[in-house]
Image (tube, grey):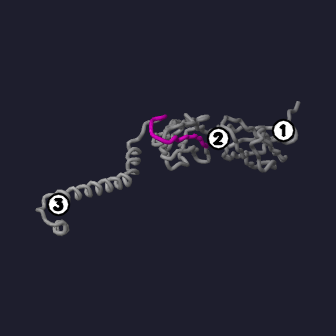
């Protein structure tokens, strides 16, 4: 009995490179899908993906070739994306794992009521999502507020301190950015007129500024008071001299006083 060698049937393989990607949410990323014909394969391989957040281009490869898997994910999570190639009854898949990261930013408290010249303080909390470890730069839209520190690595807290002298309602935004990621926290501050301590300690520098505002008025008051004292002293002095003069005529007394 004669045995005949049966060659392997034509087929293809599919692979992905890389197979794991860490990316920020909202940022586009790509992987290469490689199709390789085996055993004299001559067919056309159609490519699809199971994710609506991804596309493949081109969508088919003849015998062997590459396609690009492009994905953009809006939320932080771990996602397994499958690229599937089919040719007639043949089908193979490759999987790419996406670790999508982000950060959160919260303010506590978000509503503050303070008196003028009183510091309004709030804690800015930066949280890491799905392993985020980037540097988050912090800034504010207000020139009368400061942030300490001005950046957080991965997760952590910063302190927002605001000093406003004019009464009113104010909206302060705190922005956190890391690469293409950006988030904002909002604080509402009501500043009441007058002095006191509501929600923070009065700064000594603010007291000094208020005192300096009154210096021009105080200076004017001092000048007026000084002029009055000098005038009364001169009148009293003239009366004393007139009383000490010898019994002369009024004309001589007046002349004497004018000469002095």
Is residue 122 or residue 82 the one in the foreground? Answer: 122
Which one is earlier in the sequence, the residue at label 1 or at label 3? 1
What is the span of residues highlighted in magenta in the rendered image? 183-199
Q: Secondary structure at mark 3?
A: helix
Query: Is there a contact, CB below 8 Å, between mark 2 and mark 3?
Result: no
Q: Which residue is mark 1?
A: 90
In whole angstroms, how far apart are the C-alphas of marks 1 and 3? 132 Å
Q: Secondary structure at mark 1?
A: strand
Asked if residue 197 is among those painted magenta in the image, a careful observer would answer yes
Which one is earlier in the sequence, the residue at label 2 or at label 3? 2
Q: Position of residue 63 (x, y in %)?
A: 80, 48
Q: Position of residue 155 (x, y in %)?
A: 53, 36
Of the two numbered discs 1 and 3 in the rendering, the one whose residue sits closer to the viewer? 3
Q: Which residue is mark 3?
A: 242
Badge 2, how many Cα within 10 Å: few under 14, some, many 20+?
some
Q: Outermost residue, left direction?
A: 246
């Amino acid at each position: 009995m004669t045995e005949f060698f049966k060659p392997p049937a034509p087929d293809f393989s599919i692979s992905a490179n890389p197979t794991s990607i860490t990316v920020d949410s909202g940022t586009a990323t790509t992987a290469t899908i490689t199709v390789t014909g085996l055993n004299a394969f001559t067919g056309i391989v159609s490519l699809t993906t199971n994710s609506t957040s991804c596309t493949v281009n081109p969508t088919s490869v003849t015998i062997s070739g590459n396609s690009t898997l492009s994905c953009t994910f809006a939320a932080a999570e771990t996602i397994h994306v499958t690229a599937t190639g089919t040719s007639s009854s043949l089908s193979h898949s490759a999987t790419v794992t996406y670790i999508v990261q982000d950060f959160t930013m919260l303010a506590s408290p978000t509503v503050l009521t303070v008196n003028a010249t009183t510091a309004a303080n709030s804690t800015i909390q930066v949280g890491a999502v799905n392993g985020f470890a980037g540097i988050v730069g912090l800034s504010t839209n207000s020139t009368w507020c400061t942030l300490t520190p001005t950046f957080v690595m991965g997760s952590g807290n910063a302190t927002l301190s605001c000093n406003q002298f004019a009464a009113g309602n104010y909206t302060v935004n705190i922005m956190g950015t890391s690469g293409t990621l950006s988030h904002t926290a909002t604080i509402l501050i009501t500043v009441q007129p007058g002095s006191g301590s509501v929600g923070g300690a009065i700064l000594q520098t603010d007291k000094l500024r208020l005192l300096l505002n009154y210096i021009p008025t105080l200076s004017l008051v001092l000048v007026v008071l000084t002029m009055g004292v000098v005038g009364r002293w001169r009148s009293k002095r003239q009366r004393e001299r007139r009383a000490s003069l010898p019994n002369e005529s009024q004309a001589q007394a007046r002349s004497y006083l004018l000469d002095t």
